[in-house]
Image: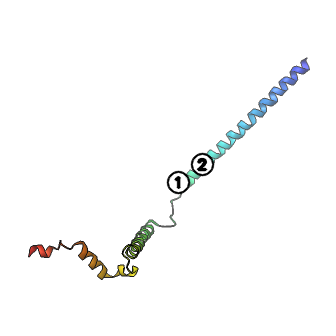
Amino acid sequence: MPNNQSEQQSRKSYKQSKKKQPEKKATDAKSRKEIKQQKKAEKLASQPRRRVFPIWLRIIVVILLAAIALIAGLMIGYSVLGDGNPLEILRAETWEHIYDIVFQGNKPNEEAS
């Protein structure tokens, strides 16, 4: 019987040791992860951020893209909705004509006379 008890104790100790090993790995991995995060934070804090695409260049690119989108939208709208030549929207005479249509009765010179 003492043999049987020692076997049970050794089995229990074996199971307990197996249960404890994954916990150690988990805590080791966690601590390694924390160490990596700390090193990364220290590295980022010590170095100034260098932008590959500067802010002033971003602003210029956004303005250019907005202008291109506006012109493309005007050309598509004028040719599809207005059944006109898309390049006509770029001429000054077209804009004068549109201005005359919009402000037909609201000319400031005529009201003063």
Which residue was labeled with disc 2? 37
Quarter of the image that includes the C terminus: bottom left
Check the image and report above or below for 16 versus 71. above
Secondary structure under tag 1 reads helix
Rendered location of residue 38, percent (x, y)? 59, 48
Secondary structure under tag 2 reads helix
Residue at 87% across / 24% down in the picture? 7
Which residue was labeled with disc 1? 45
Check the image and report above or below for 26 versus 85. above
Residue at 12% across / 75% down in the picture? 110
Rendered location of residue 100, percent (x, y)? 23, 76
- Decide which of tag 1 and tag 2 comes sooner along the chain: 2
Residue at 27% across / 79% down in the picture? 97
Front: mark 1 or 2: 2
- Picture quadrant of residue 8: top right
Q: Nearer the viewer, residue 79 or 44?
A: 79
Q: Which disc, if any, is residue 88?
A: none
Label 1 crowd bin: few (<14), some (14–19), many (20+), radius 10 Å? few
Q: Nearer the viewer, residue 21 or 42?
A: 21
